[in-house]
Structure formats: structure tokens, C-alpha cells
Amino acid sequence: MKVLMFGWEFPPHISGGLGTACQGLVKGLSEIPGIFVTFVVPKIWGDETGDNYRLIGGNEVVLREQLFPEIHENEGFNQISLPSGIIPYQTPEQFWAAKSRRLHRDSRFVEVTEEGTLKFSGSYGESLYGEIRNYALIAEHLAMEESFDLVHAHDWLAFPAGMAAARKAGKPLIVHVHATEFDRSGGDINPRVYAIEREGMEYAARIITVSHFTRRTVIERYGIHPSKVITIHNAVEQWSGSEKENLKKGLPGKIVSFIGRITLQKGPEYFVETAHLLLQKMNNVRFVMAGSGDRMPAVVEQAARLGLSRNFHFTGFLNPEEVRRLLAISDALVMPSVSEPFGIVPLEAMRCGVPVIVSRQSGVSEIVRYALKTDFWDTHAIADALWGLLNYPVLSNLLIRKGKEETGSMGWEKTAEEVFKLYRQLNFHYHAL
Amino acid sequence: MNKICLILSLHQSLPLRPYRFFEIGDHAPYRDEDALVKNTSSLAHCSYLPVNQLLLRHIKNSKNQLRVAIYLSGLTAGNLEKYAEEAYDSFRQLADTGCVEFLSGTFSWSLASLFEPAAFLRQMNDHRQSMERLTGRRASDVFINTGLYYDNRIGALLTGAGMEGVITEGDKQLLGWKSPDALYSDVRFPGLKMFFTSPERNAAFLQPFSASKDQKQSGKFRTIQEEFQADGEDSRLFNLMLPYNLLSQQKGQASGNLHLLDHFLYTALRSPALEFCSPSDLLHLRTGIPAVQTDRMLPVEGGNNFLIYDPDNDLQQEALTRLYEMTGKMGKITDPAIWHEWNFLQSSCHIEYMANNYCNPEPAQASDPCSTPYGAFINFMNVLNDFNLKLDQHIKY
């Protein structure tokens, strides 16, 4: 079975958990015999690795104009490819020359580089909507060039691409919801993003959500029929590390970390508030906030206003290796997310032997048992849980020991197996029609 | 003729208030008195009073044929006296009939017997006093330990305290081919009679009204009743233990259980093959009492019995160790208010919340710290820290 998968980012060039989750899933799937995944991202940097799967960058796909149906002779049958209607041009002259011809009404003009490719930044910049549109063009193009059995698209940025490919090739689409606009915006949603998400979900044959929490959002807020929505929990990459022992802390005292984008969704303010509460009773604790995001200035100001600067540190964005090092010296991790569809960081922390406190408003709290769970708004409860972890060693030792065991059994193979089951099911239905 | 000991137990769990680390050193109250008042009076009206009235009615109608044993924890008795006088009086009325034996036990339904003999003896003594106050007569010599725990060490303590009987759970490993439906004595302490109750039978008795619509289960109740009334060659002794909290008048499963008990008492009291007796009635039986040797702790985990305390549970182990470390300090304290708090902290319900398989899926409030074992542990430890500071201050002055 061949799967054409669309994502937006892929490690090591990531800004959050989405890329990591995609990589884990693809790796897991590629270990299942009889399945081959082609993973597409808008931009490829050249240092990504892919062992058993193919990685295509949208910026590498050469668009060519195809005006008439082409007939390829295969063994025993002829394959006819229909014109895509994509008309690439490099210069204004080429554009006007093409424009003066008689064209099909589906024709679209696309400005390409000298190599005939499209430019992608691969980030989340100002021209995001343009890039999403171009990505869909690439998908449409690939749908004609590649052969595959189904399309799998991750999150709204890749939904239009997934839809374009599925529509063109007449194959079923699975959309994978790692987060919704409601999680990212905290309720003040962007209608344009919502529309794209909803269209993708409605078009899709099946929707995979990463938690029951997200499944409810998809059903309730996007009006999707429950029978179409399946929860398949994310996993954590297995890693046999002993770095915890090798690394020495440069700082005295306990270290409590927050790892994630500093955005409304992740609840960084609650972390600062917790630090403020705890530091009134303990002073040998240091709080580290790793990540960057639009709320950073406000959070830095908040920490300064509360007079926490001596014990509160901002590291900015950390790459996976640095995250691992931070986890190795951490005594606790707090994830006070306001609305977290899954949240992979706590699993990584538990795997590294760091006890965690997660908000009840997160998908990960559905599947972990050996973690402390609180409501994100209840900073007194978070502070109290943290106090317990730092002052009652029996508790933290228990959570460290059991947490490692628990995450040890949460490999991507299991998630991939479930996804594969869904593929087979869908493929069966599709061919039966 | 078969004999049946009906044992009812009552210890109302008294959750701690959410006690944040901020409050350590403030000596704020440990329990939510308002919630306690509300809880006590509502439980008294929907459970304690109806059950006691039912018992009184059957005692009267059967002309004192019904005999019952009740364990009422000292903490609960104190709360009832303070906040639900009517219920307290109903226990006194039961005692006045002479048909109800109030069993000895720990004052707080505590686990002191497993950790600190001194604290255990004190708990036992306090409980006897509170029962004597309630009933106006000498306390019973039959002991029921928290969670029915029993081993040689506890046996020695009980014998030392002059107890003549103990209620615990017998399992296959201990009894082998022997039937649990008989009175036994301990090899090491021949003066101590052992009453075994069967957790399976206790659970099955209340099963017909459980949520599971299992046809087999509802048949079980009838089987048990038939078993009770079967006229075999040897007479058997059944120790049926029911907690008050599973018998209530509220809507739902528990209300069915109250009717069930009513029906059971009605038929059993009219059956010629069955006789009710209280544990003390049996203490003076001298003949045919086989002895068993207990080398390990009873009861043993497994099957469908849920143990309050698990020695492998680090959280419970730590909490209890820290709690009973303070026994020495308590010896220097005379303030009755502090003694009251000490007894309250010993209540095993705090420890029960830390059990591995405990997870309250729907906490009453989101801020309820006892909804997970970890939250319960942190909260309890915060309280203990505060209590420890309080003791230090009192000892200094």
C-alpha cells in the first residue's frame, strides 16, 4: 500500500510537536511490511533523513505545463494523464504569451523559478496563505506523477494540499488533527483558518484525532459526524539514554522547566504565577522557560514585575538536543496548557526520568497515569503539586520510576499499527464501492 | 442449626480540606467543618437512621431473636453526637435492647496496629471509652481491626489487652480444606477466638442491585440465602459483614440494598434452620474449636477484596511512617484539641485515597486534592508537616 502524506514541517526543522509527531508516525509506518510512505513538506533543507520512506520537498518539484492529454504506454494498458491546468511561467513575457492562448477555465498561472519550481519559506510567515495555496498546487501535480492508494494530511496547513491530491487522483483522504484553531487561539478564532479546517474535515473520508479531547472539539465545533472521527493517541520515540547521569547541573538548587511555544495555548502565564507562589516558600528553586512565541515579551514583563528575575530564566527556542539536555538536569516539568490536543513534551520528560505536572485540559492527561494532573487555571494547585514533587522524595521517585516504565510502552509502532488498520479498512471500503 | 453473625460497620470517611503548602505553619484547620456537618446529617438521614430503625423494628418484632454486632468508630460516634444527635440516640436505643453488641476496634478506624503498638493500644482504649459512653456498659471483648488486618503481632497485642475474639478474613491459603464457616482459635493465642468472614459472600450478598445486569449475580443472593438455611449435619457459622455506606435510602443501588436487608431479616428470622447470634454469645462455646496458625498478615490481596493499605505502595508506606513517627511527641501533649486532631489524622480514609487503584473519576470539585493518589499524598503530607510544627511549638512551651 502506498501512502502520499502531506505535512508542514519535518525534524530537525521544527517549531513544535507537529514535526516530531509526523516523523514518529512515518518511521513507525515504514517498519510495517507492505506499506510505503511518501512524505511531502513544502520545503526541504537537505539535512533531513529518511531511511525507509521517501521525503519530497515542495520546493524541489518541477512544474511543467501540460496542455493536452498524454498517453503513456504501459505493459498491457495505456495510461492517460489529463491536463492539470497549471500553467507555470518565469517572466512577464511568458505569462502574457500563455494568457493570449485559448485556455480551459480551470487554468491557473503560477510564477516559478528558473528551475521551474515554486518558492517556499517553510515557515509560518506573512505569506502563509499564499504558500498553502502553492502547496496545494504542488500536491495536485504530484497526484498526477505519483501512484498511491490514499492521501494522509497533517493539520490545516496541509489540508488543502491533501484535498487537491485526493480530488485529482480520486483517492480517499485521511486528515490527521494534531490541533484545532480553538486550541491555538483560545476561543478567538480566525474564520479563514476555521474554514480551511472545516472543509478538509468535511472532505476527508476519515479524521484521526490525537486525543478524545480533540475528538470532542472536532465533533462539537466543526459539526462532523462522530462515526468519521477516530482517536489514535500519539506516542513518544523510544530512546535508551543515560544522559541524566552524565550531565551535571551548573546551578545549585532544583530546576523546574516549561518547554513549549510561549503562546496563549501553552499557558506560560500560569507557569510564572506558579513560580511566584512557590518562591515565596522556597528559594532554592530555579524556573526555566524554554521556547519562544508571541507572548514572550508579556511573560518576561510579568516575571520582572513579580520580581522573579533571580530565579527565573528564559532560554529562547531550544533544538531537540538542547531540550534533551535541559530535561536531563530538570527536577520537574510543568505543562499548564490551556488547551492541548496532545502534548508530547511531558512524555519525553517522563521518558528521561523527569516527573511531570500536566493540565487536565490536555490530551496527554488521558493516557498517562504516573503524572500529576491539575486544572491550568488553578495555580495554587500547580504550585502545591510542585511543592510535593520537590519536597517529598518518595513521590518524585515513584513518578520517575513508574513514568519511565509507562512511557517505555508507548512506542510509535503501536500508533502506526492503529493507523495502518484504519488504512486497510478504508482501502477495503474504497475498493468495494 | 446454622448460626449467623451479622456485623455492621460504620466509619464515615472524613476528607481533609485542600491544604496548600502555603498554609504549612499557619495551623489552619485540617478539615472542612461545614462540609462535615452537612455530610454527617445527610448520611444520618439517608443511611444510619433508616438502618437502625430497621434493626429496631426487627428486634422488636422477633422478640429479641435478632442479634447484631456493630462497629462504630469513635470518630464517627463523636461527630454524630455533635452534629446528628438523632442518629447517635438511635445507636443508644439499639444498645438498650441488649441485642446489639458494639464491637471493640480502633478509635479512628486507623492502621496503627501495623505501625506503632503504643498508638494502637491508645486507639483501642479511646474506642472502648467512647463505646462505654454510648452504651453505658462494659465494652465488648471481640475486636475488629481496620481493614480486618491480623497477624501474630496484633494477636499478641490483643491478648495482652484482654480481648477474647477477633474478626478477620480467612482465605484458602490459611484454611486449606477447612471451612471458613466455623469458629477457630489461634494456635499461639488459644484464648483468642477467630471469626472469619468471606469477602466473596459479603460482596455477593449486596450484588443483586449492582449496576451490572448479570443474571448470574442476582441468582447468587438466593443461593446464599439457601446456603444459610440449609440443614446440614454440622451446624455452620456465617459471619456476614456489611458496611453502613452500602445500605441507604437514597435513590440508586444502595436503597435497594436496604430493602434487601429488610427482606433477608424477615425471612431469616422466621427460618427454623437459622439462628442469629452476636460474637460474644459464641465466645463461651468450648467444644470443637479447631486451631489455625497464622504466619503472615491477613487478609491477603487477591480476588475481589480491596485492601486499604498495600505495603508495596511507597506513598502509603511513607505517609504512615511519617505519621507514626510522631507518636513519641504525642506522648508529651495534653491538649485535648491536639489529641482530637491526632485521632482525626489517623483515620485510614486518608491512606485509602493513596491506593494504587484509587482514582476518583469525577471529583466533587475540580480542586478536590483527593481525586488522585498523588494529590491525596501531597495534601496529607502538607497537613502532617503543619501538625509536626504545631507539636514542636507545644512541646517547647
Image (tube, rainbow, N blue to C red):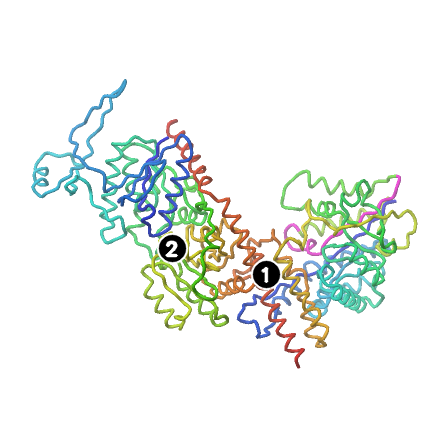
Taking depth in this image into account, of B392 and B253 the one nearest to the observer is B392
* Residue that numbered label 2 is attached to: A322
Would you say residue B235 sits in the magenta stretch?
Answer: yes
Crowd tier of the residue under label 2, counting other residues whose Cα lies within 10 Å: few below 14, some 14–19, many 20 or above: few
| Residue B265 visible in this rendered orientation of the protein | no
Dot 1: chain letter:
B
- For badge 2, the amino acid type reads Glu
Labelled pair 2, 1 in contact (Cβ < 8 Å): no
* Snapshot quadrant of residue A288: bottom left
Q: Position of residue B82 (x, y in %)?
A: 70, 70
Q: Quadrant of the C terminus of chain B?
A: bottom right
Mark 2 or 1: in front is: 2
Q: Quadrant of the N terminus of chain B?
A: top right
Residue at the limit of the structure toward the right, as seen here: B287
In this image, A96 relative to B306: left or right? left
Taking depth in this image into account, of A282 and B113 the one nearest to the observer is A282
In this image, B215 relative to A115: left or right? right
Residue at the limit of the structure toward the top, as seen here: A76
Dot 2: chain letter:
A
Residue range (magenta):
B233-253
- For badge 1, the amino acid type reads Phe
**Who's the residue at 53% across and 71% down the image?**
B22
* Residue that numbered label 1 is attached to: B377
Which disc, if any, is residue A166?
none
